[in-house]
Amino acid sequence: MCSLQTEENHLASMAFALPTDEITPTQTTLFDISWQDVLIPLVTEFLSLKDLFNLRCCSQTAKRFVESAFELRKDINLAGNNSHNVELAFAVLGKCCRRVESLHLARCHWLTDDYLLPILAENTRLRVVNLNECVNITPLALQPIIIECKELRVLKLSKCQWLTTGAVDALTLHHSNLVEFDISHCTAIGERCLIIFFRKLNKLNVLSLANTPSVTDQVLIQIANYCRGLEHINLVGCAAISDYGIHALITACQQLQSLMVHRCPNVTERVLAPLRGRIFIDRPQLGYHVPALPGLVNCLYLQV
């Protein structure tokens, strides 16, 4: 009896079934394309962070997709972005990102240790960190960068008044492979600290010490002795240096391409004149105008 009832149910279902050609196919969407092989490496590469966050709002699937893209993202650039609620977006990045290599947060006045530390804890492959003019963080935020980020090559801390001698001493212990370093306008660092620090940086190419009071001829002599591959140096506003230190620098650093010495009253034409025409100097001779600043030199000059 049970078998007969089952058979009748089966025949009834067959009778009311739609013909094969009338069955509506499942709708295909963008997210059916392979995320890992196609969408993330070939599509999200061309989307800005703003685009990705807009996409993230569209649906639950879009949210999961964008967060998967964040997990593989290598560059985060929010420099100068102080728009409304940007710190909340950054908190999302801190939870999702795992492979960031370049972190650009210059002039982000909302940035505090609480926002920065989570993303630093999950991204130890950082090679470039730009915290110029980030005034609301503390030396605590540098600790994971100094200790965990062994591949660090570029560190920018201009106008970070919170930068202390202790933090620079820690950098000295853990990093000798920096190729670009910026501590312009950092007034809390002492001369002795800098002298010890530059003894380890024999791979340094770009250095900015503008308006750093502790930069003296003795510091320049150490740079000349140990950073012989130096190509660009910004000493604007370093009133304590003189011809003596500049002469030591240019004698030892044969690859030097630019020298910024504007507002250095003790640096004279006696040492600068033989260099003109060979390297770029930001300070013109009397009666001449500074030529157009090329590439990287222009960027260094405009930071002052």
Image (cartoon, grey):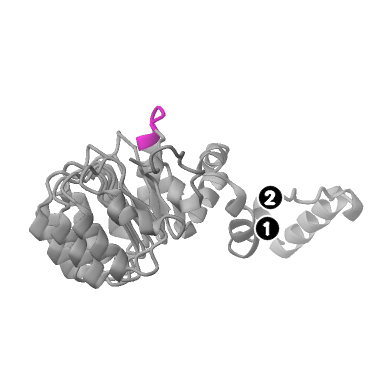
Residue 74 drawn at (x, y percent): 46, 58
On whether residue 84 falls in the magenta region, the answer is yes
Q: Amino acid at mark 1?
A: Ile
Is residue 69 among what the camera can see? yes
Q: Amino acid at mark 2?
A: Leu
**Residue at coordinates 59% horizontally, 60% vertically from top-left?**
41
Q: Is residue 169 left or right of residue 283?
A: left
Q: Is residue 168 left or right of residue 281?
A: left
Nearest the viewer among 37 and 152 is 152
Task: Name the residue tied to disc 2.
Answer: 30
The label number, if any, that marks residue 33 in the structure image:
1
Is residue 100 among what the camera can see? no
Nearest the viewer among 265 and 202 is 265
- Evaluate if marks 2 and 1 touch, with contact meaning CB atoms under 8 Å apart: yes
On whether residue 206 falls in the magenta region, the answer is no
Nearest the viewer among 219 and 199 is 219
What is the secondary structure assignment of the residue under circle 1?
A: loop
What is the secondary structure assignment of the residue under circle 2?
A: helix
Above or below 99: residue 136:
above
Residue 121 drawn at (x, y percent): 28, 58
Query: What quarter of the picture does the C terminus occupy?
Result: top left
* Magenta residues, start to end: 82-87
Residue 253 drawn at (x, y percent): 32, 68
Q: Is residue 249 left or right of residue 63?
A: left
- The outermost residue toward the top is 84
